[in-house]
Image (cartoon, rainbow, N blue to C red):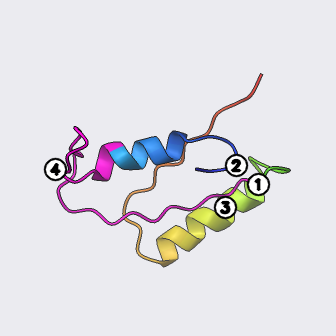
Amino acid sequence: MSPDGSHGTQVAGILGALPNNLIGIAGIVKEISLMPIIICSFEDCYNSAYMDQAVRYAVDNGANIINLSLSSKN
């Protein structure tokens, strides 16, 4: 769970949950490798420099698809 919530964990579970896991959910991708990258801390979040570094890191390390979930706190 990231310091700013559990949305990314939920998305990863929807994508990559193993079938027949006795939990009651099967992911939508049979073979998947996930690369969770958290750019938030409890003090700082949604910093564009961190986002840029995270995307570059993911691409440099083989990511083919990137889910960048962002939200706004009101």
Residue 47: image location, x then y, percent: 78, 52
Q: Residues within 10 Å of mark 3 (few under 14, many from 20)?
A: few
Which amino acid lies under the numbered mark 4 shown in the image of this protein? Pro
Residue at 45% from the left image edge and 65% from the top image edge: 35
Mark 4 = which residue?
19
Q: Residue furthest front?
A: 22
- Indicate the amino acid at tag 1: Ser
For the magenta stretch, what is the residue range? 14-41
Give the class, few, some or many, for how many residues have Cα within 10 Å of label 1's Cα (few <14, many ≥20). Answer: few
The residue indicated by pointer 3 is: 52
Contact? badges 3 and 4 (CB < 8 Å) = no
Q: Earlier in the sequence, mark 1 or mark 2?
A: 2
Q: Are circles 1 and 2 on residues that touch, CB within 8 Å? A: yes
Q: Amino acid at mark 3?
A: Asp
| Residue nearest the viewer, comparing 26 with 38 | 26
User: Which residue corresponds to the image point at 45% horizontal and 55% vertical from the top-left?
Assistant: 66
Question: Which of the two discs, 2 and 3, sits closer to the camera?
Answer: 2
**Horizontal and vertical percent position of residue 74:** 77, 22
Instruction: Calculate the distance from the C-alpha at mark 2 to the C-alpha at mark 3.
Output: 19 Å
Which residue, given by chain and number where applicable, does mark 2 sit on?
A: 3
Task: Inspect the magenta stretch and tell me whether residue 51 lies in it.
Answer: no
Considering the numbered disc 4 on the image, is that residue within a helix, a strand or a loop?
A: loop
Pointer 1: what residue?
41
Give the mark nearest the N terminus, 2 or 4. 2
CB atoms of marks 2 and 4 within 8 Å: no
Q: Earlier in the sequence, mark 3 or mark 4?
A: 4
Mark 1 vs 4: CB contact within 8 A: no
Residue type, label 2: Pro
In-front residue for pair 35/23? 23
